[in-house]
Amino acid sequence: MPDYITTTAALATFLAEARFARVVGIDTEGASFHRYRDRVYLLQLSTGSRTAVVDPLVVTDLAPLGQFLADPDVEKVFHDADYDLRTLDRDYSFRARRVFDTRIAAQLAGEPAIGLAALLERHLGVTIPKVHQKADWSQRPLPDSMLTYAADDVRHLPTLRGTLAQRLETLARLPWAHEEFARLETLRWTGSAGDDAAFRRAKGAPRLAPRQLATLRELWRWREAAAAREDKAVFRIIGNDALVAVAAAMPRAPSDLPAVRELPAALARRHGAALLAAVARAASLPDDALPQRERIPRHPRDPRFDERVQRLKAARNAVADQLQLDPGVLLGRSAIEALARAQPTEPGQLETIPEMRRWQVDVLGPALLGALA
């Protein structure tokens, strides 16, 4: 069993010892699959020889962890660090320095599968069960099986980091990884609550007429309020497909609800009155208050731009094939389109394109410039 840390003093003691290890695996657990208001519900740290699970619902002063994350003398190993770093910023304004991401390392090493379980099995012969993959980490008390599962997510990260770093060094790609890791330090939480235009992005919404779209907006707002009130993930109140179907049908009476095939009978019984009230609100709106279908402007196609994109992709793909890398890992579409727009003619101009990394300029520069010549 890992150490289960419930006091600031115990956390500070563990972190003081962890500093001597110099390499520490870190992971977090949230509950967005279950809760409307997500937050960090569990923090796991491991030196490889010792693993701790920190309960942030009990340890309310996590200042020692913030100081530890900012310590440049200790390497923090995450697997797919992006969301962990953003949530640590969101909940605590913690910023990590000197990060190693085993997912990015695996991509740059050309691994056939980059999930943590696949990497651990391939390189360390370790099998991690997936039984708690969608568990509710907000529940308390947490059973021993969940604590063990959470600890296993970080226990092997320091060893896996060493294996992947050695592989990258052999391939002369470790500097690529360090450039990517440095960019992780700039990540900040960018999520926003209360997106009142989210209803437009539901599957099927663009086909709705304005009053039906107004109905979907009312239904969406009702569901958001219900989910917030009950602190449940919105899909646990009612799914998007059912809301879009109700908006399309605009039922006016309880007897109309069974005709909405996408609306389960149990949900019709539970939420019928609220659904009908939302429909009624939309039905009473004046025409000038109805949301209109969004017209996405269509830019005229530029055959020369498209041709440059295709030439750049072909050049990128040829180099990716030589390096045995996924083409999208070597250079993404946004960078290719930026190159096609900028049309650089010399190496120095490549370095001015924000979407390009320095290692990509070094590896791909001649091929890209040749494709644009």
Image (cartoon, rainbow, N blue to C red):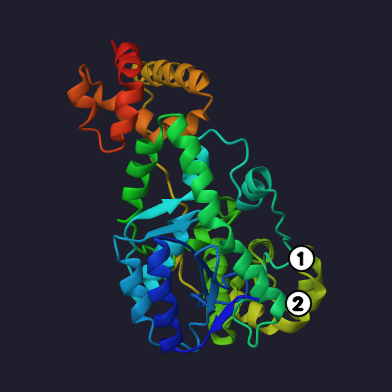
Q: Quadrant of residue 348?
A: top left
On the image, the x and y values in percent for residue 72 come to 29, 60
- Element on which disc 1 rests: loop
Q: Where is the C terminus found, in terms of image quarters?
A: top left
- Element on which disc 2 rests: helix
C-alpha separation, residue under disc 2 versus residue under disc 1: 9 Å
Using the image as rendered, state which of residue 126 and residue 251 is in the foreground.
126
Q: Quadrant of residue 122?
A: top right
Q: Which residue is mark 2?
A: 268
Which is closer to the viewer, label 2 or label 1? 2
Q: Which residue is mark 1?
A: 260
On the image, the x and y values in percent for residue 76 come to 41, 60
In this rendering, does residue 191 appear at all? Answer: no
Using the image as rendered, state which of residue 147 and residue 81 is in the foreground.
147
In the displayed image of the protein, which residue is found farthest to the left?
348
On the image, the x and y values in percent for residue 115 come to 61, 48
Binning the other alpha carbons within 10 Å of mark 1 as few (below 14), some (14 to 19) or many (20 upward) gives: some
The residue type indicated by label 1 comes to Val
In this rendering, does residue 357 appear at all? Answer: yes
Q: Residue at x 56, y 63 (%)?
A: 154
Q: Find residue 321 and name its label.
A: none
Q: Residue at x 76, y 77 (%)?
A: 268
Q: Where is the N terminus found, in terms of image quarters?
A: bottom right
Q: Residue at x 43, y 69 (%)?
A: 18
Using the image as rendered, state which of residue 234 and residue 360 is in the foreground.
360
Q: Earlier in the sequence, mark 2 or mark 1?
A: 1
Q: Is residue 159 above or below residue 229?
A: above
Q: Is residue 329 above or below residue 43?
A: above
The residue type indicated by label 2 comes to Ala
Q: Is residue 60 above or below residue 221?
A: below
Binning the other alpha carbons within 10 Å of mark 2 as few (below 14), some (14 to 19) or many (20 upward) gives: some
